[in-house]
Image (spheres, helix red, strand yellow):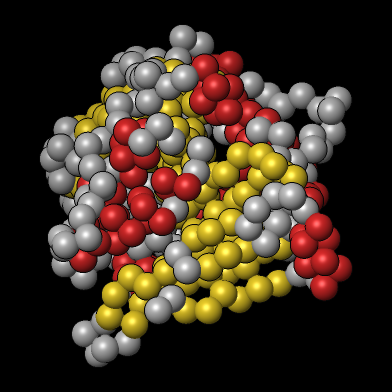
Amino acid sequence: MSAPARRSGSAKAAGQAKKSARPAFEIGEHRIAPGTRATIELPVGVLANHIPVNLPVHVIHGRKPGPVIFLSAAVHGDEIIGVEIIRRVLRSSGLNRIAGTVLAIPIVNVFGFLNQSRYLPDRRDLNRCFPGSGRGSLAAQLADLFLNEVVKRCEFGIDLHSAAVHRMNLPQIRISPDSSPRVIDLARAFAAPITLTSSVREGSLRAAAQSLGVETLLYEAGEALRFDELPVRAGVRGILGVLQALHMLPARNPAEKRRKPLETSASRWVRAPCGGILRMFKTLGAAVEKGERLGVVSDPFGDVEMDVLASVDGLIIGCTMLPIVNSGDALMNIAHMHDPGVAEEHVENVHGALEADPLLVDDEGS
């Protein structure tokens, strides 16, 4: 049996929900009335010490009809920035008047999250195990549960990620090369500094959702096991912007025009020319020109140094956080840009707007 739902909302809202013609939202063995919200728990499995583990899903079921969307985070258990983004979104008072339905899953990979690990206990990467199988490995079973209980009920999704451990990403939205015009418009509504068109990885949540006709935006920002404030704010602002574009929320300010994100379909990692100690001369969000000196790799004695050179004109959208590197290690990810200087200025302007926005600070939803 599923765990009981934890409900919130006033008696007045419940009374109004009874008068609504919109049906209750059904998930697992639970029914959420229109105009209410509840956290339900879907059984995932049992730990080695026989403690059950559940997948919490917060459902906000509006009184008015509209799209059903999911917000997911921590598919990789150590990529926790999305947990904070979803927490702040759920505190937004506007969601109490939402049209449609939001399914918020801040921690998909419960096992990895508890262990501060990217993987599940069987060392599988959940984001390579979709669509999964109810009779497969632990990862396959979790993927199957999430796909059938959450994704199949939705029309659209936003999946939140960070860079892997010891790396950091500039806030960016990734869409597939065959994305529909609607998804491209929603990526622009998210208004992350960068929108990158990238191929969909086999076995990923995005690929499985797309095969079901549920298009998904992939948000990448920050680093594993860290809450980075500006990437968090960009994620909160982006999700609210998408909800507004879907007419699930009213526009915050009709006169406000968000900066259109930079768009590119190519990025390239610059790799270490040798092993040693890395000193970087460029930071995340910096403009670079092909052949420009980005840093040096030295031996521990300083006798040998090799330059790290930019392979293309563009903007640094990802970088390593470790100064100790081996030959061939990925050091900086450069998104190709025709005018890197303009791109750098754009990123600085977006960051300035995020720093100045009082609605995006911690505990902003009051």
Q: Residue at x 51, y 38 (%)?
A: 155
Left or right of 75 on screen, residue 88: right
Left or right of 114 on screen, residue 67: right
Percent coordinates x, y for residue 305 in the rendering = 20, 36
Among all residues in the image, which is located at the extreme top? 338
The one of 39 and 217 positioned closer to us in this rendering = 39
The one of 265 and 67 positioned closer to us in this rendering = 67
Percent coordinates x, y for residue 361 in the rendering = 72, 55
Q: Residue at x 33, y 70 (%)?
A: 44
The image quadrant of residue 350 is top right
Among all residues in the image, which is located at the extreme bottom? 49
For the C terminus, give its image quadrant: bottom right
The one of 68 and 53 positioned closer to us in this rendering = 68
Percent coordinates x, y for residue 254 in the rendering = 84, 28
Can I make out residue 84 in this image?
no
Q: Residue at x 42, y 28 (%)?
A: 175
Q: Residue at x 29, y 55 (%)?
A: 143
Can I make out residue 286 in this image?
yes
The one of 115 and 205 positioned closer to us in this rendering = 205
Would you place residue 118 above or below residue 209 in this image?
Answer: below
The image quadrant of residue 331 is top left
Percent coordinates x, y for residue 9 in the rendering = 76, 69
Left or right of 362 on screen, residue 302: left
Would you place residue 157 above or below residue 255 in this image?
Answer: below
